[in-house]
Image (cartoon, rainbow, N blue to C red):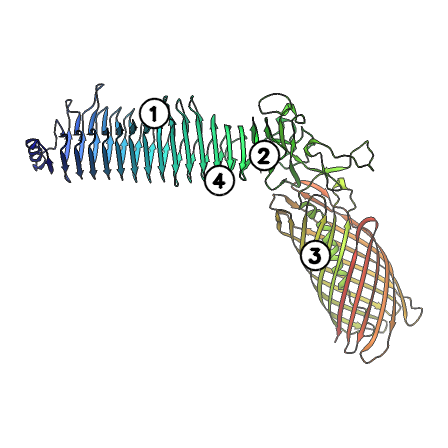
Amino acid sequence: MIVSHGRRHALAAALFTALTTPAAAADFPYGILVQSGSALSLASGDIVSVSGTATGRAITVASRASFDATGAAVSNRTSGNPAGYAYGLLVFDGSDSDMQGGAITMLGDRAVAVQVQGASRAVFRDIDIATAGNGSLGIAAVGGADIDGQGTRIEVTGTDSTAVLVRGGAHVGISDGDVLTRQAHVGAVVVDGMGSTFTARRSRIAAQGEQAWAITGTGGEVRLHATRLEGAGGVFGSRGPGADPLRVHLMEGSRAVGHVESGRAALLLRMEDSELVGDMHRRGTGELDAGLTRSRWMGRATGVDRLRLDASDWSVTGEADVGQLTLAGASTVAFAQAGTGFASLRVGRLDSTGGEATVRLRTRLDAGGAMARQATDRLLVQGDALGTTRLDIVPAGGRGAATAPGAGGGISVAQVGGAASEASFRLAGDYVVVGPWRYGLHAYAPGEADASQRRVAGNGSDYWDFRLQSTRIDRHGRAFGLFGRSLPVDAADDASHLPVSRAALAPQVPAYLALAGALFGHARASLDAAHPDDLAAAHDAALRVRGFGGHTRYRSTLPFDRFGVDSQRSDTGVQVAGDLVAIESDASHTRAGIVASVGRARIAPRAVDGVGSARSESRALALTYALRADAGWRVDAAYAVSHHRVAVRSHPRGEALARLRANGNDASLAGTLRWSPTSYLAVDPGASLLWQRQRFTSAQDRDGIVVRLGAPERLTLRAGMRAALAFVPHGYWLSAWSAHVYAGYATTRDTGTQAVLSGIRFATGGGGRQVDLAAGMSAELRGDITLSVDIDRRVAVGGAGESGLALRVGLAMTF
């Protein structure tokens, strides 16, 4: 129903009668007029519906009037003409309007569902506003008007139509609502003029037609809070000329999908805790200035004047250029991974003085060289590069390579045409690993850069070139060819040539190269400890516990430039053994047993490529056999199977390979002759043969290196002499004791000792030759207990091979 107050009581009474008549069609050819200074209310269920060519306004609220409605429906079927629009609700200067529930529907062309102008204010709660005709407007706020829509849905479906127009210092605010356009080449929200503002909270703005824009304007301010936007043509765009820029603020978890474009008017975009998916383009004379704080952007930049990222991420989807790029906080610029080729980011001026910024580049890591052979994203700075920017290299194919040194070798990833320094860029993680090779970032200063590879504007070599190249090192670990300059030749060196150098390896690679030889040495130490103690008197079956340990230094049999790797190894282990058979005849004594071992080896390569190490946990089971004849000869044999679990670490990456497995087989056969010139002295010359094999599983470490160590074998021939003094004091506690010394010579032959790392084959060196010197003693106590201790000193012959000290202690108890 209608409740009317004012001077025109007769008009109000007529409206009241018409609207409350049960059979009324609610079709008023002249609409409703709320006179100046009066007030009018519509109740729930009231309908205002006008049609015909003569009626252009459904509801008109004159100056300083008041209108409110609850649950009312407004419909206008008329169309406007070149002289004016048709209106659903038209509110003039200084008036107030409040509508809750209901709908406003415009069916004709050139129709405006709501227009509020002057110093008027209108509030809409849970209202559906729709226009179907061409050249129409959903809401228009002009001349300082204020519109507040709460839970309101605005939909326009005609061509050349706009859902929201804000002009002349007016304001429109929408919360928990929807703004929707469906036709091509339209703007869902248009903001024009200095002082005009549009605000949306927890709302959705969608321009679904081809080349349709979510928000456009020639000036004013747009503030979006927790709002979703999408535009088939774009989300934000500045159009015709305007002295005031269009300022857009995207805040509080808002998300925009579509392009951002500046035309003749400037566009300033500020984002906080929000996301943008779409390109930024400068199409006209107006500047495009964007700033992101704790936000994310995916898209390209074309002609963007200024871009500031503060603790934000930009995913670049193609070729991009920015006049000034400022990176603050832990910001990241990364080239998108999916479905895009390599691209370049061109920057007029780069400022990374405000934090730890990262630029992530995809690079095919291979030998590089000429520009035609390089495949990489690039950062190209035409002007100055301030501060330090981290370059995070993402491998995009390639097996790695030992690149050529110098300004034309490797891969150019960043160039600077203005002021810079060697510290302007650094690699995230300090180096890049592909295959076994280690790439470093080498800076070539103006005058040293390769003019033929210049990609910043200008000509010649007067630019900075930052290139991924193999770091070449000499045997002392000094970088070779760093920054395009060679190492000085030592005074002791021949001045006609530089020191021998080679490409640096990833820090964990030397551990892989040293691993097979180290496990051979550990297995040999374990098998040496497994042989039965030489009991002085008792020939009965015995139970034994034995511990072994040692420290060994290995010097590779390969030269430095063939990736010879020296190492150190520390062994510890404990064994429990028992005799299965102990038989004595008139002429001989036979003993056979089984030995279970638990051991650990720590391997530390002594390489100049970086700090790496390996740790092996070993389990072994061995069968032993000894035959000693009274005629003075003796035969010993043993066979062992072992399993090794290996972990490899590197600095500063930490654990590089957590699970590497190896299964070992070891077999030995030894023969000795005994000569006893006296009853106390025995001299035993002898020889032995040891065969070993390790079968490694394949694995891939955290840097992507595929490790294949194969199944290397080693054959060791030893010959030497042992002299022992035996005493039988028959004391109360001590039944017998002996002391011995040993001197021998050993030589090894290795087969299959090679490592294939990501398809690159490396020789790993051999065991070399050694002189062994040993001493020890054993004591048989009453109670059939024997204690023993041995010390073994090994010295490499010719400087290559193993040298070290080993210790074994044991306890045996016969039964």
Pick the residue in front: 142 or 110.
Answer: 142
How far across and how far down the image is residue 769, in percent? 83, 51
Q: Are marks 1 and 3 in contact (CB under 8 Å)?
A: no
Label 4, on which residue?
311
Report the mark closest to the observer, 4 or 2: 4
Q: Is residue 233 visible?
A: no
Report the Cα–Cα distance between label 2 and label 1. 40 Å
Q: Earlier in the sequence, mark 4 or mark 1?
A: 1
* Disc 1 crowd, CA 10 A, few/some/many (<14, 14-19, 20+): some
* Disc 4 crowd, CA 10 A, few/some/many (<14, 14-19, 20+): many
Secondary structure of the residue carrying numbered label 1: loop
Report the Cα–Cα distance between label 3 and label 2. 38 Å
Q: Earlier in the sequence, mark 3 or mark 4?
A: 4
Secondary structure of the residue carrying numbered label 4: loop
Secondary structure of the residue carrying numbered label 2: strand
Pick the residue in front: 637 or 312.
Answer: 312
Determine which quarter of the picture holds residue 192. top left
On the picture, is 486 further left or further right than 374? Answer: right
How far across and how far down the image is residue 556, in percent? 77, 47
Q: Residue at x 82, y 60 (%)?
A: 670
Pick the residue in front: 573 or 415.
Answer: 415
How far across and how far down the image is residue 74, in percent? 18, 33
Q: Is residue 608 visible?
A: yes
Report the Cα–Cα distance between label 4 and label 1. 35 Å
Q: Earlier in the sequence, mark 2 or mark 1?
A: 1
> Label 3 sits on what residue type?
Ala
> Label 4 sits on what residue type?
Ala
Label 3, on which residue?
601
Label 1, on which residue?
185
Label 2, on which residue?
363
On the picture, is 153 further left or further right than 574? Answer: left
Secondary structure of the residue carrying numbered label 3: strand
